[in-house]
Image: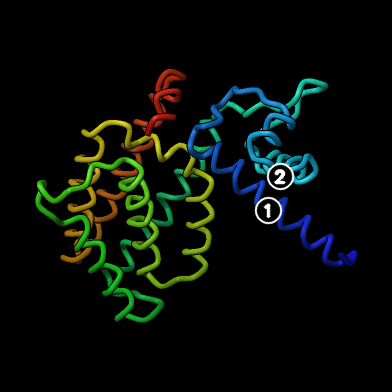
Amino acid sequence: MSLVESKSNRKILAEEAYERIRYELFNFLLLPGDRFTEQQLCDRLSVSRTPVRQALFRLQQEGHVEVLFRNGWRVLPIDFKKFDALYDFRILIETEAAQRLCEGRISGDIAVSNQLLQELVDFWLVPKASRIYDAPAVSRQDEEFHCMIVAAAGNPVMQNTHREITERIRVIRKLDFTYQPRIDATYDEHARILKAILDKRSEQARLLLKAHIESSQIEVRKLTLHQLHLAREI
């Protein structure tokens, strides 16, 4: 194997290790406060120490884990102040996108915008008997609902920034769907938001979106360590 091939292979292994550890963090297989060693991850992931270490340093830079002096690694506690700031920014972007949709100020292709909104209508504006209650599936669809609202407005800078925020808060947003009442509430709230956008009721759409996001934010803030442990089973 040439030097170039060797470097390329190491990069691939490090990326794979990063994705797998990140998956464990975001799916609460590793919980806030959990301690672990590089060797434990190596054994579990069947990967050598170098790519695991590279992945952990990358996750450390992103604020997910910290290294403990001569004592392995630790998953960082949830920093709710940081998430509050991200939620505030998310509200600004999504309410602006909703207003643009209501006022017809679409930056991109109107046909694409209409198609995205129709896809949302097809999923969320359904009878209660047709709703799905699989928490991971609803969590993914909820994320796409908000991303597609922004995408429909057609501004790529807004869309990219919103995607970055979505990536960073995904780890806690998933916990909003631990209980069925939250799933029903999400269906109901999304339906009202969509109807307001389709009816061009700008101010109502903005207020509904803001209230919906803040409600989710409050629910997530109620989390206890016990509920985080329960999340392993979701």
- The amino acid beneath tag 1 is Glu
Q: Secondary structure at mark 2?
A: helix
Expressed as whole percent of the image width and height from the top left, the position of residue 120 reads 25, 62
Residue at image location 44% in from the left, 50% down from the top: 90
Image quarter hosting the N terminus: bottom right
* Distance CA(mark 2)–CA(mark 1): 7 Å
Residue 36, placed above or below residue 130: above
Where does the image place residue 156, in percent across and percent down from the top left? 49, 70
Left or right of 77? Residue 139 is left
Of residues 64 and 29, the one nearer the viewer is 29
Name the residue carrying label 2: 55
Image quadrant occupied by the C terminus: top left
Q: Give the image location of residue 39, x and y in percent.
A: 74, 30
Instruction: Say above or below: 110 vs 200.
Output: below
**Can you tell which quarter of the image residue 2 is in?**
bottom right
Mark 1 lies on residue: 15
Picture quadrant of residue 8: bottom right
Could you classify mark 1 by the number of other residues whose Cα lies within 10 Å: few (under 14), some (14-19), or many (20 or more)?
A: some
Tags 2 and 1 touching, CB below 8 Å? yes
| 61 horizontally vs 164: left or right | right
> Residue at left 52%, top 63%?
160
